[in-house]
Image: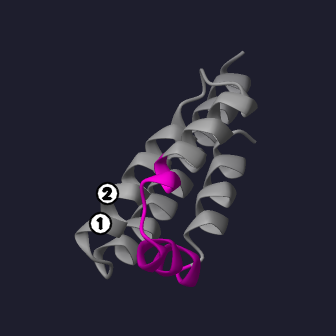
Amino acid sequence: MAFFKQKFTAAIEQFQTKRDEEAKKLEEKLSSMGDGAKNIASKISKVSEDMNLTFEQEQQQIKDALGSATDDIKSKLEDTDLFKDMKAMKEKMTQ
């Protein structure tokens, strides 16, 4: 029993470490953007982290957040590969 508890604890710690590393990378990318892009990215990030949303709800809320963004903000978000990073982070968090 102690063996499984130890393995479980180690897995949780590894997960938390990876989550923190990915969050730090994302924060570094966001810090180089303007406030408008940061706000949109923050909204999208929160939606992506909400595990209570269905896929369809998540996609709709992301679409709504991007709908309020200017073309310049959308371009900044795309240029930083933010969407790829958030998807990778979500996949890592659910593994």
Taking the image as shown, residue 79 lies to the left or right of residue 23, namely right
Q: Is residue 78 magenta?
A: yes
Secondary structure at badge 1 equals helix
**Quadrant assignment for the C terminus:** top right
Residue at image point 70% right, 39% down: 94
Residue type at tag 1 = Gly
Q: Position of residue 20 (x, y in %)?
A: 44, 55
Q: Nearer the viewer, residue 9 or 45?
A: 45
12 lies above or below 18: above
Q: Position of residue 90 (x, y in %)?
A: 64, 48
Residue at image point 60% right, 76% down: 81
Secondary structure at badge 2 equals helix
Dominant secondary-structure state across the stretch colored magenta: helix
Taking the image as shown, residue 95 lies to the left or right of residue 71, namely right
Q: Position of residue 92 (x, y in %)?
A: 68, 51
Question: Which residue does the numbered mark 1 point to in the structure image?
Answer: 36
